Image (cartoon, rainbow, N blue to C red):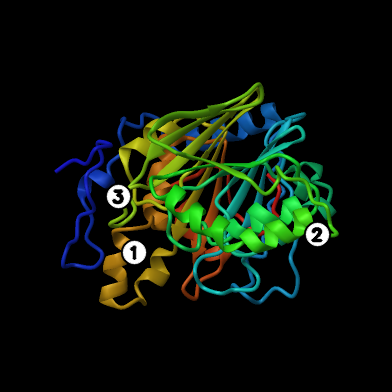
């Protein structure tokens, strides 16, 4: 059975690790040997100026870092586009990994994907570290992949805090069906606060607290003179509406998977992109989960082994792991699992990492 977006619903197999074999196959035949792929990748990276200063805290288990590290990677010499990971976390309340949020930046404009817990303070930290596009009053655009609580729970924060600090235009939100129903009661809940800030001694502006909400379907959903944004449907458990996004700027193509199992729509929209930002869980850690949780994650997320196959097909210039589920593993373990079947450039993303 195929849904309205042409995506098959998840297959629930009684064997916890069983998968639809169609989700594992590569969609075009590979003709290069591993050695040739490595050689061509190396030459291509040297030619483009890709800097693989992979400053991983890979020897540390999640939660073992004493402070947030800023990690910088340059995808192209002179690129005006950047990716900033504002949060790489999951529903697990890990203080070292804030809730899922990614900023796609071109020059002085930021386009934020998802707004997990801590979104605004992470943006403030990035601004303090020199990312001027993430000045809080400059947060105008938000794209929501799906409505699992860890992805939109920061909506009140990104709606109100930048306004309190000077944003003078409405927040513009693009998200799945249901995002309007989520935003309306949030606006109602803060009516008194908004009234007091506008009519009281603060004399706040009347526009920055407003929200323009757009419910999306697959296809082009936004464009300006800096970026074209396309949404594509992905498969995330029993969610009817879940999306990934592709951002095309004048000098870079960036794809963010959202939460998904392997699906053709992601591969089709990501092929040949400069940067693929993809969620992932550790295959080794998965083996330690109960059968019930294995069944859920197998139908909702992407393992390291599956992601290696996806990346081998998509061939991004840089693969960034985010929204990582470690389950006792570390960043080096994730990379080792990925590199078993994928020889391209890959980094396990960290909060405030700049790529």
Residue 313 disc label: none
Quadrant containing the C terminus in the rendered view: top right
Query: The N terminus appears in which quarter of the rendering?
Result: top left
Circle 2 is placed at which residue position?
200
Q: Mark on residue 240?
A: 3
- Residue 135 percent across, percent down from the top left: 79, 47
- Taking the spot 34% from the left edge, 58% from the top edge, the residue there is 300
State the SS at label 3: loop
- Residue 345 quadrant: top right
User: Which mark sits nearer the N-terminus, 3 or 1?
Assistant: 3
Give the mark, 3 or 2, whose residue is nearer the N terminus.
Answer: 2
User: Alpha carbon of mark 3 to alpha carbon of mark 1: how far?
Assistant: 16 Å
For numbered disc 1, what is the local secondary structure? helix
Q: Residue at x 69, y 36 (%)?
A: 50
In this view, the residue farthest toward the front is 199
User: Depth-wise, is mark 2 or mark 1 nearer the camera?
Assistant: 2
Rendered image quadrant of residue 201: bottom right
The Cα–Cα distance between marks 2 and 1, rounded to whole angstroms, is: 49 Å
Question: CB atoms at circles 2 and 1 under 8 Å apart?
Answer: no
- Say which of 40 and 331 sits in front: 331
Report if residue 7 is visible in the image: yes
CA distance for labels 3 and 2: 43 Å
Which mark lies nearer to you, 3 or 1? 3
Query: Where residue 42 appears, x then y in whole percent?
Result: 61, 35
| 162, 12: nearer the viewer | 162
């Amino acid at each position: 059975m195929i849904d309205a977006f042409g995506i098959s619903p998840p297959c629930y197999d009684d064997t916890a690790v069983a998968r639809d074999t169609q989700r594992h196959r590569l969609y075009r035949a590979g003709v290069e040997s591993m050695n040739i792929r490595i050689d061509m990748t190396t030459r291509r990276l040297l030619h483009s100026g890709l800097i693989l200063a992979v400053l991983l805290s890979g020897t540390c288990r999640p939660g073992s870092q004493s402070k947030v590290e800023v990690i910088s990677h340059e995808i192209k010499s002179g690129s005006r586009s950047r990716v900033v990971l504002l949060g790489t976390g999951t529903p697990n309340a890990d203080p070292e990994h804030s809730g899922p949020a990614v900023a796609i930046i071109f020059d002085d404009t930021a386009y934020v994907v998802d707004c997990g817990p801590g979104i605004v303070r992470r943006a403030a930290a990035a601004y303090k570290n020199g990312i001027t596009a993430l000045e809080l009053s400059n947060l105008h655009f938000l794209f929501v992949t799906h409505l699992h609580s860890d992805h939109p729970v920061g909506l009140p924060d990104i709606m109100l805090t930048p306004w309190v600090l000077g944003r003078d235009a409405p927040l513009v939100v693009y998200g799945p069906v249901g995002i309007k129903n989520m935003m309306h009661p949030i606006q109602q809940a803060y009516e008194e606060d908004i009234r007091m800030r506008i009519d009281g001694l603060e004399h706040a502006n009347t526009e920055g607290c407003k929200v323009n909400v757009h419910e999306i379907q697959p296809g082009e959903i936004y464009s300006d003179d800096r970026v074209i944004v396309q949404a594509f449907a992905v498969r995330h458990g029993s969610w009817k509406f879940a999306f990934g996004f592709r951002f095309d700027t004048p000098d870079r193509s960036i794809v963010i998977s959202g939460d998904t199992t392997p699906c053709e729509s992601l591969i089709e929209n990501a092929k040949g992109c400069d940067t693929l930002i993809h969620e992932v869980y550790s295959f080794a850690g998965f083996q330690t989960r109960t059968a019930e949780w294995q069944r859920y994650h197998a139908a909702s997320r992407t393992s390291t082994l599956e992601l290696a196959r996806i990346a081998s097909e998509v061939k991004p210039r840089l693969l960034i792991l985010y929204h990582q589920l470690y389950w006792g593993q570390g960043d080096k373990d994730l990379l080792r699992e990925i590199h078993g079947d994928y020889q391209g450039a890959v980094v396990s993303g960290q909060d405030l990492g700049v790529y």
